[in-house]
Amino acid sequence: MESDSNNNCRECKNSSKCFQYLYPEELDFINSKKAQVTYLKGETIFKQGAFAPYILFVTNGLVRVFLQTGNLKQLNIRLTKQGEFMAFSSVFGDNIYNYSAVALKDSTICMIEKTALKQLLMKNADFAIRITSKNCRYEARYLNIIQNTSYNQMRGKLASALLYLSSEEFIEEDVFKYLARQDIADFASITLESAVKFIKEFEKEGILQLPGKDLKVINRNMLEEIAKRG
């Protein structure tokens, strides 16, 4: 983990479009209330249950967000990439982080004091609408997780997870290069053994290609059908 306090919000080329709705003096204010930290691949960014003084913004990198559901069991809930926020709900009263986050590759994170961000949300309506709507879209993802874990059989669970991980928003990230088979299993909420078994089945059925340790989805239509059937 490496701290860099010299990055200026006005000059940042990786900032969210939401920040374009801030006035120069508001950018200066938020700049004075944040710290930029670089996490190396595999480093924990924050832990579930820890005190949450910051909203985190991914300036660069790729982050795995997960719930710790038991001593050794995890449920991966989403990937966070450049231009996205984590722990945004803590602005509205949560004092602890509701999930954990770990860097899948070297990642630069802006840690913004949540009280400062809340102040800007209350002051600038355009900014508030943009940033809130950006984060509300995660609700659909969480509802999909609930449906997937509650009703789908294991093949359907894995198909849904692979559809999410190979979706258009991650095309430029080549996410499977950074995910172990255990990570994929944790996105599907199935065991590692089951994930490996069904990945091999999907390869034989012409749904996936497995070049080395990589994974490529070559037939999304079949995956969608398996996910629908559950």
Image (cartoon, rainbow, N blue to C red):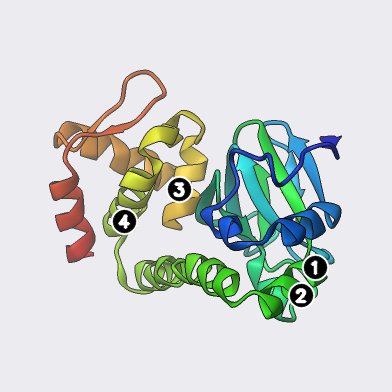
Q: Nearer the viewer, residue 102 or 131?
A: 131
Q: Label 1 sits on what residue type?
A: Ala
Farthest top residue in view: 212
- Residue topped by disc 3: 185
Q: Position of residue 65 (x, y in %)?
A: 59, 54
Task: Report how far apart the C-alphas of labels 1 and 4 lie in the structure.
Answer: 38 Å
Q: Earlier in the sequence, mark 2 or mark 3?
A: 2
Mark 4 / mark 2, whichever is N-terminal = 2
Instruction: Find numbered disc 1 in the image and state the secondary structure of the residue it sits on.
Output: helix
Q: Quadrant of residue 148?
A: bottom left
Q: Are marks 1 and 4 in contact (CB under 8 Å)?
A: no
Tags 2 and 3 touching, CB below 8 Å: no
Q: Are marks 3 and 4 in contact (CB under 8 Å)?
A: no
Residue under pointer 1: 116
Q: Which residue is pictured at 46% across the width and 37% down the height?
A: 181
Please determine whether, in this image, residue 59 is positioned above or below residue 18. above
- Looking at the rendered image, the disc whose residue lies closer to the viewer, 3 or 1, is 1
**What residue is pinned by disc 2?**
119
Q: Position of residue 77 (x, y in %)?
A: 51, 59
Label 2: element kind: helix
Please report the residue visible at 19 percent of the width from the left and 64 percent of the height from the top.
228
Q: Going by the image, does 144 lie left or right of 18?
A: left
Crowding at dot 1, Cα within 10 Å, few <14 / some 14-19 / many 20+, comes out as: some
